[in-house]
Amino acid sequence: MGILSRTSYIIRSKLNSLLNRAEDPNEQLDYSYEQMRDRLQNVKKGIADLTTQKKRLEIQKRRLEENVERHNEQARQAVEQDRDDLARRALEKKKQKMNQIDSMETQIADLEQKQDNLIDQKDELQQQIEQFRTKKETMKARYKAAEAQTRVSEAVTGAGDEMEDVSRQIERAEERTEEMEARSAALDELRESGALEDSLSDKSSLDRELEDLATEGAVDRELDTLKAEMGKGETSTDADADVATEDIETEDAQLDDVEAVPDSDVEAELDELKEEEK
């Protein structure tokens, strides 16, 4: 896996982890619960507004009813005073007020109907909210338990995001270690074969082999000496006999060489010596 591929994989893993944390079911449930409570508050506000409007109409209706009674009394007084014109005017105003009262009663009845509907909706919504709250708390508890169990399982099995990162680090470390081991083995093989000279030394492989042979010879001689001192090698008599034999053979060879020299050569050498003395 190349550098870009590993980087892309790590970035995608981190983004998925962030998105998973952003999509926390507990937060979503709490948000939905708050939205339902907001709707309930809006319903209650609507009921309060309807109730206020109905109360205003009822107050106006009572005032109109009072005016109706007052106009009725004015009509009686006018009739008693033989003022039919005033009585007629009082009765006309009474009739207008009664018509307004009828209209207001219709509006009040309509508002009461709407109020009753809103109250029913409010009660139903409130019941749904209570049920949702119970389910929400249950789901949150289940989610927390599942989340804790998942973390424990990931820690035990090594399947978590952190363990995946650790596994990737171990894989890369193993790859680099194997690469370094192979490189080291190749360098050792080249150095042993002599194909790779020591960069810090000006000696060739031949020089080093000769030095090794000289070292081995010195060690062998020292070992023979040590054996001779400890009586582990040949006996001194045999050694002396061998040395004497070698000396005799050497003297015989020298005598043979002397006898083999011609007399003329001897005389020539003597003449040269005499000349040098003069």
Image: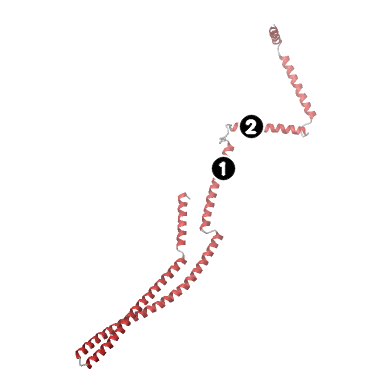
- Dividing the picture into quadrants, the one containing residue 223 is top right
Q: Earlier in the sequence, mark 1 or mark 2?
A: 1
In-front residue for pair 91/242: 91
Q: Is residue 260 above or below residue 107?
A: above
Judged left or right of residue 73, residue 161 is right
Instruction: Identify the residue position indicated by label 2 in the image.
Output: 211
- Dividing the picture into quadrants, the one containing residue 226 is top right
Can residue 105 be seen by looking at this rendering?
no
Q: Is residue 52 above or below residue 245?
A: below
User: Which element type, helix, strand or loop, lies under badge 1?
Assistant: helix
Instruction: Identify the residue position indicated by label 1 in the image.
Output: 184
Q: Residue furthest right?
A: 237
Amino acid type shown at disc 2: Glu
Judged left or right of residue 233, residue 84 is left
Disc 1 crowd, CA 10 A, few/some/many (<14, 14-19, 20+): few
Residue at image location 45% in from the left, 54% down from the top: 11
- What colour scheme was applied to this rendering of the protein? secondary structure
User: Which element type, helix, strand or loop, lies under badge 2?
Assistant: helix
Separation (CA) of disc 1 from disc 2: 26 Å
Q: Position of residue 182 (x, y in %)?
A: 55, 44
